[in-house]
Image (cartoon, rainbow, N blue to C red):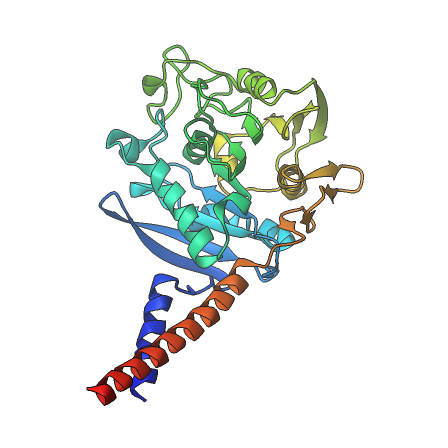
Amino acid sequence: AEYMGTAKRMFAGLLFVCPLLARLETGEQLHTIEHDGLTRQYYTYVPQSFKESASPAIVLVTIHCFEGFPKREMAKFTALAERMGIVLIAPEGIQNSWNAHSCCGYAREHSIDDLNFIKNTIKFVITSHLSQTLSQTPVIFTGFSNGGFMSELFLYETHEEWVTGVISFGGHQYKLSNIRSGVAVMTHHSVADTMVQYNGCCDTISCCCEISEHSDVCLSVDMLFQNWTSANGCDSVTTETLQSPVVNGTLECSHGIGCLAPTVRCKHNGFDHEEWEDNMQYGDMILEFISEAVCLRHGTFQHSTKTCECEMGYAGDLCTGTTHTIHLPLWWMFAGLVAAGVAVTIAVRTRQRQREFQRLN
């Protein structure tokens, strides 16, 4: 009994070092995390369609606008999450703002470290709650207005291999000195937007929220798209005109051809800035963009059938899994059983040696 008690204590210690952490529950959950001396909040949403399998889950990070709310931004993508079985993470900005350099509010004025807060939140959710490795997990960022500015920072100020794509709505970065290649990019912007101008925000073009005062470069959406097509090595560009599903107007979507990753600009007409706050009627377009972005990591995307043909060694609908990998939680369970066996064996042998020593002395 004594050596069994010793074994139990050793096993408990091993579980403390290598914990089998709780999985995320289906639906919406609120979480807190400590970062830079502050208690920060974020939400997660796990769809009913989510299935644990050998293929790592896709993660979509939704970033709210200035004076916006994480639940409101996340709600725009829950239907898409259910269709694709992807996990949503919705961080919350301090005083509902983000420090994305030129935009906006309290977070910008006080130099809040939002980039690393979001990065650390993603890493914690993926490794601790989803039990996945970062390098295997496709992460897509999306954001509206201040959230669009914030999302695009992950293109220019971080070179994490898990950053798979960015989708911005009504807000983009203006300084592109460190633009990454091979990352999927999509931007939606309206030429009628007076709060965050289509042609950029600077001293000659006035925008809301003191964006112009904090930007010394007027970079239009068209110039942004040119930089993206160059960085992603696109051979050419094709443009299609579509009927807007939100207002009585049209949108022109330009797609890079022969790119390292999907590269898309959608120019909207008759569309105010505030329309992005609740409307997300582009589910099919975004679904295909995310599917192609994830597929191209380890496969070839077929637009005609919207399917992914995997490279050798990879498997799954979008080639996110491998043909020879045991899912990480199973490894942990196996390792735990082995560790328990080793602990018991050590405890038994130690007790036997103690008894032998007492008998001889």
Q: Residue furthest front?
A: 360
Q: Position of residue 114 (x, y in %)?
A: 34, 38
Residue 124 versus residue 216 in the image, above or below:
below
Q: Residue at (46%, 30%) from the top-left corner? A: 152
Give the position of the N terminus as an image quadrant: bottom left
Q: Nearer the viewer, residue 153 or 160?
A: 160
Q: Is residue 250 left or right of residue 353?
A: right
Q: Nearer the viewer, residue 99 or 347?
A: 347
Q: Position of residue 191 (x, y in %)?
A: 55, 22
Whether residue 328 can be seen here: yes
Residue at the spot 48% in from the left edge and 44% down from the top edge: 61
Residue lying at the far left of the rendered structure:
361
Q: Quadrant of residue 234?
A: top right
In the rendered image, the vertical position of residue 277 relative to residue 56, given as above or below:
above
Query: At which x and y percent is residue 351?
Result: 30, 82
Can see residue 5? Answer: no
Q: Is residue 246 left or right of residue 63?
A: right
* Residue sitting at the far top: 204
Q: Quadrant of residue 174?
A: top left
- State the residue in front, 225 or 127: 127
Q: How many marks?
A: 0
Residue 4, above or below 171:
below
Which image quarter: residue 217?
A: top left
Instruction: State whether residue 119 is above or below residue 262.
Output: below
Q: Is residue 93 left or right of residue 88?
A: left
- Classify the position of the C terminus by image quarter: bottom left
